[in-house]
Image (cartoon, helix red, strand yellow):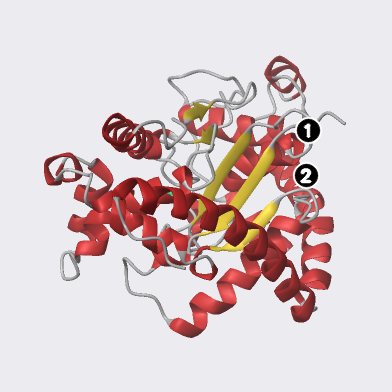
Amino acid sequence: MSEAPRKKVLLSGIQPSGNLMIGNYIGALKNWVKLQDQYDCFFILVDLHAITVQQDPIELRKRCYDFLALYIACGIDPNKNTIFVQSHVPAHAELTWVLNCYTMMGDLSRMTQFKDKAKKHAKNINSGLFTYPVLMAADILLYQTDLVPVGEDQKQHLELTRDVAQRFNSIYGETFRIPEPFIGEKQQGARIMSLQDPQSKMSKSDENPRNYIALLDPPDLIRSKIKKAVTDSGTEITYEESRPAIANLMTIHRAISNEPFESLTERFAGKGYAPFKAELADMVVEFLKPIQARFKEIRSDKSELESILKAGAEIANARTQRLMRKVYKKLGFIPAG
Ligand code: TRP
């Protein structure tokens, strides 16, 4: 019997920090739901990455369960994808050590995210923050990943991953597959910006929660956040680069309604911002309602969530142990029994 052709591996990590929000849904989750049949998908809750900045242990644990339940509520099927917690799969830490020895200090010191985070957490510039991209490289290379969906802020880390993999391969022979960035067809234009500052990306870790709409925000809060979102001068609902605030709200509308920009412009001609914002708010509330209901149900069954994570970690452990044996052998380590 011939084997089914290997599906391409698509892998992404998500930091269990902040609050999953509408930008994560529109920019990432929504696309992954569509890709889950086509690709062999790995979604990792990267708790080891999270501790590069100080975390409250109780909050961190709770957030990992929340994120998992939200993923599932958004349509990520745990039977079709491998979802697990990074710390449940020891090979992530092991390969990180190995790759550290093939990653240059100079390259790491050029990482813009390190520079940004070092500025933001000036009292805790630990070496984990510095080697963060090496752990990310290990995440990716452990599964012979073909595709990594990356936003602008993670492109540099993916480049570094490719460099490290190529360096290792050129010394020891073909070991790691070289990953490519994944640019979804609808990815463009799906970049959601902050509600109060449309020049910067909507971030789940923003210290001002008014900048984002969390997937679990209650209806009143969603309405008030959209109502108070900044707008541009003028009153028309038109999509123009020079009017980033209204363009952003229109992008959110379209991502949920699929209604073209021209149609929005037409429908709201001469009406001003208020009715547009009101419609958008209602739409977001209605859209999130079933997700929130599913979340509540899924989140209440902790033993089910635990068994999903256990199953994910089993698959991940089997795959990574094989790869680690190969890596250690190439390095010249004595096989462990
Ligand atoms: N560094 C990524 C971020 O901050 C998260 C991440 C960790 C990741 N490991 C990964 C993303 C592997 C893609 C692939 O967003």
Q: Would you identify the image quadrant in which residue 257 lies?
A: top right
Q: Is there a contact, CB below 8 Å, between mark 1 and mark 2?
A: yes
Mark 1, secondary structure of its residue: helix
Camera-side residue: 60 or 311? 311
As drawn, the residue found furthest toward the bottom would be 58
Q: Can the viewer see residue 37?
A: yes
Horizontal arrangement in the rendering, residue 206 relative to residue 6 (left or right): left
**Vertical order, 137 against 89 (above or below):** above
At a point 77% along the width and 24% down the height, the residue shown is 259
- For residue 257, the mark is 1
Expressed as whole percent of the image width and height from the top left, the position of residue 137 reads 38, 45
Mark 1 or 2: the one toward you: 1
Amino acid on which the number 2 mark rests in the picture: Met
Mark 2, secondary structure of its residue: helix
Q: Which callout, 1 or 2, points at the residue further toward the start of the chain?
A: 1
Mark 2 CB within 8 Å of ligand 1: no
Horizontal arrangement in the rendering, residue 312 relative to residue 111 (left or right): right
Expressed as whole percent of the image width and height from the top left, the position of residue 94 reads 38, 61
Q: Could you give the CA–CA distance between mark 1 and mark 2, rounded to whole angstroms? A: 8 Å
Pointer 2: residues within 10 angstroms few (<14), some, or many (20+)? some
Q: Quarter of the image containing the N terminus?
A: top right
As drawn, the residue found furthest toward the right would be 1
**Vertical order, 92 against 260 (above or below):** below
Q: Give the mark count.
A: 2
Mark 1 CB within 8 Å of ligand 1: no
At a point 26% along the width and 59% down the height, the residue shown is 129
Q: Would you identify the image quadrant in which residue 214 lies?
A: bottom right
Amino acid on which the number 1 mark rests in the picture: Ser
Horizontal arrangement in the rendering, residue 81 relative to residue 324 (left or right): right
**Vertical order, 101 against 239 (above or below):** below
Expressed as whole percent of the image width and height from the top left, the position of residue 20 reads 58, 57
Residue that carries the numbered disc 2 in the rendered image: 283
